[in-house]
Image (tube, rainbow, N blue to C red):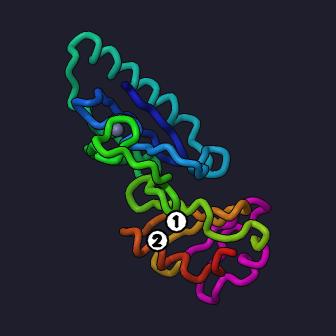
Amino acid sequence: MLYTGSIGWEGMLGLFRSPETACLECLVPRSSDEPPSCEVVGVLGASTSVIGSLAAVEAVRWLTKEESSLLGKLLVYDFERLTSYTVPVKRRTSCQTCGSTPSTVPRRKAITLRGVGEYYLPRAFDPATYSRVLAEVPKGLTVRRRGSSVALVVLPEGVTLALFRKGAVLIKGVGSLREAEKAVSWLPPKL
Ligand SMILES: [Zn+2]
Protein backbone atom coordinates (compact mmCIF):
# COMPACT_ATOMS: atom_id res chain seq x y z
CA MET A 1 0.00 0.00 0.00
CA LEU A 2 1.29 3.40 -1.00
CA TYR A 3 0.20 6.05 1.46
CA THR A 4 0.30 9.80 0.93
CA GLY A 5 -0.80 12.65 3.12
CA SER A 6 -0.45 16.42 3.39
CA ILE A 7 -1.34 18.65 6.29
CA GLY A 8 -0.02 22.02 7.40
CA TRP A 9 3.51 22.41 6.05
CA GLU A 10 4.08 18.66 5.95
CA GLY A 11 3.75 16.03 3.29
CA MET A 12 4.11 12.30 3.87
CA LEU A 13 4.76 9.26 1.76
CA GLY A 14 4.81 5.69 3.03
CA LEU A 15 4.99 2.21 1.54
CA PHE A 16 3.63 -0.80 3.42
CA ARG A 17 3.26 -4.50 2.71
CA SER A 18 1.72 -6.15 5.73
CA PRO A 19 2.53 -8.57 7.33
CA GLU A 20 6.08 -8.17 6.04
CA THR A 21 5.97 -4.58 7.31
CA ALA A 22 3.69 -2.53 9.49
CA CYS A 23 0.31 -1.68 8.00
CA LEU A 24 -1.33 1.71 7.62
CA GLU A 25 -3.29 1.22 10.81
CA CYS A 26 -0.05 0.68 12.74
CA LEU A 27 0.77 4.24 11.66
CA VAL A 28 -2.69 5.78 11.93
CA PRO A 29 -4.80 3.86 14.45
CA ARG A 30 -8.52 4.13 13.97
CA SER A 31 -10.17 6.17 16.65
CA SER A 32 -13.45 7.70 17.59
CA ASP A 33 -11.64 10.98 18.22
CA GLU A 34 -11.38 13.42 15.38
CA PRO A 35 -7.80 13.69 14.11
CA PRO A 36 -6.38 17.05 13.04
CA SER A 37 -7.74 17.96 9.63
CA CYS A 38 -6.64 20.30 6.83
CA GLU A 39 -9.80 22.25 7.56
CA VAL A 40 -8.54 23.34 10.97
CA VAL A 41 -4.76 23.09 10.57
CA GLY A 42 -4.60 24.17 6.92
CA VAL A 43 -2.57 22.64 4.12
CA LEU A 44 0.06 23.97 1.76
CA GLY A 45 -1.59 23.29 -1.59
CA ALA A 46 1.68 22.97 -3.49
CA SER A 47 2.85 20.22 -1.13
CA THR A 48 0.10 17.94 -2.40
CA SER A 49 1.44 18.08 -5.94
CA VAL A 50 5.01 17.41 -4.75
CA ILE A 51 3.90 14.43 -2.69
CA GLY A 52 1.64 13.25 -5.51
CA SER A 53 4.56 13.33 -7.96
CA LEU A 54 6.80 11.46 -5.53
CA ALA A 55 4.06 8.86 -5.07
CA ALA A 56 3.82 8.41 -8.84
CA VAL A 57 7.59 7.86 -9.04
CA GLU A 58 7.45 5.42 -6.15
CA ALA A 59 4.56 3.53 -7.74
CA VAL A 60 6.45 3.15 -11.04
CA ARG A 61 9.58 2.00 -9.19
CA TRP A 62 7.61 -0.52 -7.19
CA LEU A 63 5.75 -1.87 -10.23
CA THR A 64 8.93 -2.30 -12.24
CA LYS A 65 11.39 -3.41 -9.55
CA GLU A 66 9.19 -4.47 -6.63
CA GLU A 67 11.74 -3.14 -4.20
CA SER A 68 12.09 0.15 -2.45
CA SER A 69 14.09 1.64 0.38
CA LEU A 70 10.81 3.19 1.50
CA LEU A 71 9.20 -0.16 2.32
CA GLY A 72 7.95 -0.09 5.92
CA LYS A 73 8.93 3.53 6.34
CA LEU A 74 7.39 6.97 6.26
CA LEU A 75 9.08 9.79 4.38
CA VAL A 76 8.13 13.15 5.84
CA TYR A 77 8.74 16.41 3.98
CA ASP A 78 8.85 19.50 6.17
CA PHE A 79 8.24 22.26 3.63
CA GLU A 80 8.46 24.95 6.29
CA ARG A 81 12.12 24.14 7.00
CA LEU A 82 12.74 22.57 3.59
CA THR A 83 14.00 19.35 5.08
CA SER A 84 12.93 15.74 4.94
CA TYR A 85 13.45 12.70 7.08
CA THR A 86 12.51 9.04 7.01
CA VAL A 87 11.17 7.16 9.99
CA PRO A 88 10.67 3.40 10.21
CA VAL A 89 7.10 2.41 11.08
CA LYS A 90 7.05 -0.42 13.60
CA ARG A 91 4.38 -3.07 13.68
CA ARG A 92 2.22 -2.74 16.73
CA THR A 93 1.21 -5.98 18.44
CA SER A 94 -2.03 -4.24 19.47
CA CYS A 95 -2.84 -3.19 15.88
CA GLN A 96 -6.46 -4.02 15.09
CA THR A 97 -5.53 -5.01 11.54
CA CYS A 98 -2.21 -6.86 11.72
CA GLY A 99 -1.41 -7.16 15.43
CA SER A 100 -1.13 -10.43 17.30
CA THR A 101 -3.06 -9.11 20.29
CA PRO A 102 -5.47 -6.52 18.84
CA SER A 103 -6.61 -3.98 21.36
CA THR A 104 -10.27 -3.10 21.63
CA VAL A 105 -9.50 0.00 23.65
CA PRO A 106 -10.01 3.12 21.53
CA ARG A 107 -6.70 4.81 21.00
CA ARG A 108 -5.79 8.43 20.45
CA LYS A 109 -7.76 9.24 23.54
CA ALA A 110 -5.49 12.02 24.62
CA ILE A 111 -2.63 13.26 22.51
CA THR A 112 -1.63 12.25 19.02
CA LEU A 113 1.84 12.61 17.61
CA ARG A 114 1.58 14.29 14.23
CA GLY A 115 5.25 14.70 13.45
CA VAL A 116 8.45 15.52 15.24
CA GLY A 117 7.66 17.93 18.06
CA GLU A 118 3.94 18.15 17.29
CA TYR A 119 1.13 16.88 19.46
CA TYR A 120 -2.61 17.21 19.11
CA LEU A 121 -4.98 17.18 22.03
CA PRO A 122 -8.48 16.70 20.57
CA ARG A 123 -10.37 17.42 23.77
CA ALA A 124 -8.23 19.79 25.77
CA PHE A 125 -11.01 21.99 27.10
CA ASP A 126 -14.75 22.46 26.99
CA PRO A 127 -15.62 24.28 23.71
CA ALA A 128 -18.14 26.39 25.64
CA THR A 129 -15.22 27.94 27.57
CA TYR A 130 -13.22 29.00 24.48
CA SER A 131 -13.66 32.75 25.09
CA ARG A 132 -12.85 32.37 28.77
CA VAL A 133 -9.75 30.31 28.01
CA LEU A 134 -8.50 33.06 25.68
CA ALA A 135 -9.29 35.74 28.24
CA GLU A 136 -7.29 33.88 30.86
CA VAL A 137 -4.09 33.23 28.92
CA PRO A 138 -1.38 33.63 31.60
CA LYS A 139 0.88 36.68 31.63
CA GLY A 140 4.13 36.04 29.80
CA LEU A 141 2.44 34.13 27.01
CA THR A 142 1.91 35.98 23.75
CA VAL A 143 -1.32 35.66 21.83
CA ARG A 144 -0.07 36.11 18.28
CA ARG A 145 -3.33 35.75 16.47
CA ARG A 146 -6.83 35.62 17.79
CA GLY A 147 -9.47 34.43 15.36
CA SER A 148 -13.03 33.26 15.66
CA SER A 149 -12.10 29.61 15.37
CA VAL A 150 -8.41 29.43 16.28
CA ALA A 151 -5.93 31.43 18.39
CA LEU A 152 -2.15 31.09 18.45
CA VAL A 153 -0.44 31.32 21.81
CA VAL A 154 3.36 31.49 21.95
CA LEU A 155 5.23 30.26 25.01
CA PRO A 156 8.63 31.73 25.96
CA GLU A 157 10.54 28.61 24.86
CA GLY A 158 9.20 28.96 21.32
CA VAL A 159 6.46 26.44 21.83
CA THR A 160 3.30 27.37 19.93
CA LEU A 161 -0.20 26.40 20.90
CA ALA A 162 -3.06 26.60 18.43
CA LEU A 163 -6.26 26.70 20.43
CA PHE A 164 -9.30 25.66 18.45
CA ARG A 165 -12.79 26.81 19.31
CA LYS A 166 -13.98 23.21 19.26
CA GLY A 167 -11.77 22.50 22.29
CA ALA A 168 -8.70 21.02 20.62
CA VAL A 169 -5.10 22.17 20.99
CA LEU A 170 -2.22 21.64 18.57
CA ILE A 171 1.14 21.89 20.32
CA LYS A 172 4.24 22.60 18.21
CA GLY A 173 7.88 22.76 19.21
CA VAL A 174 7.96 20.33 22.13
CA GLY A 175 10.28 17.37 22.52
CA SER A 176 8.09 14.93 24.38
CA LEU A 177 4.59 14.10 25.48
CA ARG A 178 5.52 15.29 28.97
CA GLU A 179 6.55 18.71 27.58
CA ALA A 180 3.33 18.85 25.56
CA GLU A 181 1.25 18.21 28.65
CA LYS A 182 3.25 20.81 30.58
CA ALA A 183 2.62 23.37 27.83
CA VAL A 184 -1.15 23.05 28.25
CA SER A 185 -1.15 22.68 32.04
CA TRP A 186 -2.53 26.21 32.46
CA LEU A 187 -5.75 25.29 30.65
CA PRO A 188 -8.78 24.93 32.91
CA PRO A 189 -9.59 21.34 33.80
CA LYS A 190 -11.91 19.78 31.26
CA LEU A 191 -15.47 19.63 32.49
ZN1 LIG B 1 -0.94 -2.96 11.66
Residue 87 placement (x, y as % from top left): 28, 46
Q: Residue at x 25, y 34 (%)?
A: 21
- Residues at marks 2 and 1 touching, judged by CB atoms closer than 8 Å: yes
Residue 133 appears left or right of 72: right
Residue position marked by numbered label 2 in the rendering: 180
Q: Is label 2 in a helix, a strand or a loop?
A: helix
Vertical position of residue 157 compared to residue 74: above or below: below
Residue furthest top in the image = 64
- Residue type at mark 2 is Ala
Quarter of the picture for ligand 1? top left
Dividing the image into 4 quarters, which one contains the C terminus? bottom right
Residue at 52% from the left image edge and 65% from the top image edge: 171
Q: Nearer the viewer, residue 97 or 62?
A: 97
Q: Is residue 86 visible?
A: no
Q: Residue at 29% across / 27% down in the picture?
A: 17
Q: Residue 135 appears in which quarter of the rendering?
A: bottom right
| Residue 142 drawn above or below residue 168 | below
Which quadrant of the structure image shows residue 157?
A: bottom left
Whether residue 151 is in magenta: the answer is: yes
Q: Amino acid at mark 1?
A: Ile
Sequence-wise, the earlier of marks 2 and 1 is: 1
Which segment is the magenta one?
Answer: 131-154
Residue 180 position in % (x across, y down): 46, 71
Find residue 74 and report its horizontal and vertical position in percent.
Answer: 33, 40
Magenta stretch contains residue 59? no
Task: Tell me, for residue 171, which label it has, or none.
Answer: 1
